[in-house]
Image (spheres, helix red, strand yellow):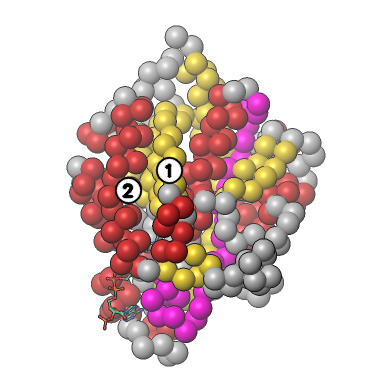
Amino acid sequence: MSVIRAVAVGYGHYLPKRVVENAEFEESLDTSDEWIRARTGIERRHFAADGELTSDLAFEASKAALENAGLEASDLDAIVLATATPDQTFPSTATKLQHALKMKGGFAFDIQAVCAGFIFALSTANSMILSGQAKRVLVVGAETFSRILDMKDRGTCVLFGDGAGALILEAQEGTGESADRGILSTDLNSDGAYNDLLYVDGGVSSTQSTGVLRMQGQEVFKHAVSKLAATGETAMQAAGVTAEDIDWIVPHQANLRIIKRTAQKMGVSMDKVVQTVQDHGNTSAASIPLALSVAAANGQIKRGDLLLMEAIGGGLAWGAATLRW
Ligand code: UT7
C-alpha cells in the first residue's frame, strides 16, 4: 500500500559563541562543577550574546539545514518553530525567521510546549504533510533560556543553555511498513494539573512582565522517568517496532540521570543513546533537534537508522516520535 511519509531531508544547528563552563557559576553561587556534573551530567552550556535573539539562532540553524538538504527557502511550504522564549510576545518568531530566510509565500507559526516543543512541532508538521496541506516543512526548535533564568537560584540557573536545531521534512511515498524512511509515529500528552512544577513566574496577561523560571526539580524528575518511558513505549507500539529495533534514542537533554533511567526502563542500552547534555545543558525545545543534528553530522546517526525521540517539560507536556532517518 502506498502512503505518504514525512521524511527528514536536511538538518542543521547553531550554538551561540559564548561557552559557560560550570566553574563560572562557582564565582557567584554556592555550587560546584562537581555537584553539577554528578547530579546532571552537564559540563558547559552556551549563552547568547547581548542582542542575539531566538530568531537569530533559528536563522543560523535553518540556513544550515537548507544547505544540508540542498534546498532554498522558496522550496518550503511552511515553518513550524517551537520556542518558549520568543523574540517578542507577538508576532511569532517563526514569521521573523520566514522574513530573515527571504521566504515568500507559505506560512509560519510558533508552537509552545516548552521542553517538549520540538516533539509537538514535529507531530504538527507530520500531520500537515500527511493531510496534503504542505509538502516541505522546516521544523525548528530555538531558545534563549538564559534570558529567563534567575541567576541567584542555583537549583535552576546551572541547568539551561541557549541554542537552535532545525530539521526539514518532505512528503515522500512509502509502503506503510516500519521499514519506510520518515516519521513512523508520534505520541503527544499533557496534564495541566502539574502547571506549578515548572513555570515562569511572569507573563503578558498575569504580570505584564517576562518573569523567571521556577522548578520543583525532584518532582519533575519523578514524572520525567515514568512519563518518558511510557510515551516512548506508546510511540514504538504505534510504529510497530520494539526497543530491540531502535538504533538511537535521541532524548530531551535535561539530565543524564533521567536519560539513563528512561533508557534502562525501555530496555535500550546507553551506547544507543545520543548524549549532548554535557556540552549544551538543557536547551528546552532546541535540545532534540540540536542532538539530532550533532549526531547526524558526526556520523553516529546513519541513513536508515530507526530513531526514538522523547521529551518532557512545563505543562506538564510530554511526547515521543519514531523516525527512520
Ligand atoms: O526540561 C524540563 C524538565 N526538567 C528536568 O527534567 C529537570 C528535572 N530535575 C532534575 O534534573 C533534578 O531534580 C535537579 C538537577 C534539578 C536537582 O537534582 P536533585 O538530585 O533532585 O537535587 P535536589 O533538588 O534534591 O537537591 C539536593 C541538594 C539540596 O540541598 P540539601 O537540601 O540537601 O541541603 C539542594 O539545595 O542539592 C542542593 N542543590 C545544589 N547544590 C549545589 C541544588 N542545586 C544545587 C547546585 N549546586 N547547583
Horizontal side of residue 207 vs 90, given as left or right: left
Point 72% across, 38% down: residue = 107
Q: Give SS at disc 1.
A: strand
Q: Nearer the viewer, residue 198 or 52?
A: 198
| In magenta stretch: residue 167 | no
Horizontal side of residue 287 vs 50, given as left or right: left
Ligand 1 is found in which quarter of the picture?
A: bottom left
Question: Which residue is labeled 2 in the image?
Answer: 227
Question: Residue 189's mark?
Answer: 1
The picture quadrant where one finds residue 216 is bottom left
100 versus 256 height, above or below: above
Single out the residue that lies furthest toward the top: 1
67 versus 77 height, above or below: below
If you read the primary sequence from the N terminus, does the residue marked by circle 1 or circle 2 appear first? 1
Question: Residue 263's mark?
Answer: none
Which quadrant: the N terminus? top left
243 versus 196 height, above or below: above
| Whole-number angstrom distance, CA of label 1 to CA of label 2 | 9 Å
- Magenta segment: 133-159
Please name the amino acid that badge 1 sits on.
Answer: Asn
- Estimate how packed mark 2 is, as few (under 14), some (14 to 19) or many (20 or more) residues with alpha carbons within 10 Å: some
Q: Give SS at disc 2.
A: helix
Give the percent coordinates (x, y) of residue 208. Answer: 68, 70
Point 26% across, 72% down: residue = 38
Q: Nearer the viewer, residue 150 or 253?
A: 150
The picture quadrant where one finds residue 211 is bottom right
Please name the amino acid that badge 2 sits on.
Answer: Lys
- Estimate how packed mark 1 is, as few (under 14), some (14 to 19) or many (20 or more) residues with alpha carbons within 10 Å: some
> Do tag 1 and tag 2 residues touch (Cβ < 8 Å)?
yes
